Image: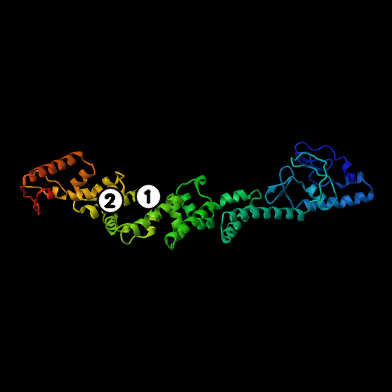
Amino acid sequence: MAWWDDVDLGTPVEGGGKDEETGITWNAAGVPVGGVPSDILEAHSPDVQATTAVAASSEFEQFAAQFELTADGRVIRNGVATNWTPWQLFNQSTGSGGPVWADDTGAASTATTTTTTTATATADGDDVRAKMQSAFYAALRQAGMDKTTIDSLWTWAETEWTNDPSFTAERALIGMYDQQAFKDRFPGIDQMTQGGVGRRDLPTPGEYINFEKYVASELSRVGIVETDFDALIAKLFVNSVGDAEVTERLNTAQQVMWEMPQEVRDTFTDWFGSQYGTSITMKTFLDNTGDWSKIQDDITTARTGGWGQMVAGLDAGWDKNLAKQVSDLGLSQAEQWSRFADLKEKEMLFAENIDEAVDLDYAEHGVAAEFDLDSDLAETIERRATGRSARFSGGGGALMSGTTTGFGAANA
């Protein structure tokens, strides 16, 4: 124990302040924050020690003048209040081993601390910085981010930490979403944020990068070379197109481009626009911002429309509205083809005889009857077929109002 530990410094000034009698300044916690007057030291020490203490007191005044202090006498460092008084720092920096006058709670204490030098404080700060940088880099590398982007984001994070020692790697990982380097690397996340998507619903950088890899693999599978990949990925994220839908869209595009008969593709073009016709590309489907379910519905409608033209020879009166009604029945390709073939065999029934007052359109009424869209029409056509067969069974002929004249049941 140092000899001055037993020095009677008198009663602390209540609430803090300078004791005019002793010349000692106290903080609100009852801790001396100024140098101890030399006359007090001399009164309680040998001559040699007193001489040293007087010199120390003079040096302390110069030492303490460099600090900004809080109201209760604690040193402010880098804008943050510490738990140290100038007197503590002076004793430790000069190696005197003097008492620690305040613990972490600011209460009086007689515990002795190890010597803390400015170099040690600096080393501690560097250690914190190094740990923070390591955690920050590790998290972003694990997410798959490139070094250039990470370096740029760390420059920002380090500046934040320098200005605010309480800034952590966790706060940096959250705050980086607002940095331009992050927005440039992840434009989809930026656009979703601007669109009002909350942070909890945004993809993480790792999820974003994994999706990029998946889409790149799928594009390679179907032979697409995308020149604006970043914009495509951003659009897919904004439109909530996930892995499964990417594959579904590309498979559908393959069918339209390479597996549909030309008649179907032509119908697609006529009914739904040239972007789906002979000039179609895979990206037409993948990059489409419309309702994917509608696009699928358009495809099935065009497919039914093309089959109707191919198998039944439908033309005038056969449009996308009627084709959609047939498509919505959910029949298989084989079933649709079978019914179109049956309709083709009944084509002559729609060329009226002179004595048949009801005009029936082959496409409109024939399709409605064949696919059970109108039960009354089905009965009307059935009665016409039965009547003609009955007349022809007597061996007579039939004069028809159309361009074709038929004789016998074969043309009924």
Front tag of 2 and 1? 2
Residue 256 appears left or right of 149: left
Residue 271 appears left or right of 234: left
**What percent of the width, then of the height, locates residue 154?**
60, 57
Residue at 18%, 39% (x, y): give it. 376
**What percent of the width, then of the height, locates residue 293?**
36, 48
Q: As displayed, is residue 65 above or below residue 378?
A: below
Residue at 56%, 53% (x, y): give it. 176
Q: Mark 2 touching mark 1, by CB under 8 A?
A: no
Residue 241 in sight from this viewpoint: no
- For label 2, the crowd category at 10 Å Cα-Cα, with few meaning under 14, some 14 to 19 and many 20 or more, is many
Closer to the camera, 261 or 99? 261
Residue 168 appears left or right of 340: right
**What percent of the width, then of the height, locates residue 115?**
81, 50
Q: Quadrant of residue 373?
A: top left
Closer to the camera, 285 or 306? 306
Q: To which residue does mark 2 refer? A: 304
Closer to the camera, 216 or 161? 216
Q: Which mark is residue 292?
A: 1
Closer to the camera, 247 or 38? 247
Earlier-in-chain disc, 2 versus 1: 1
**What percent of the width, then of the height, locates residue 221?**
44, 59
Q: Quadrant of the N terminus?
A: top right
Check disc 1 and report its element: helix, strand or loop: helix
Residue 36 appears left or right of 286: right
Residue 157 in sight from this viewpoint: yes
Q: Amino acid at mark 1?
A: Trp
- Figure label count: 2
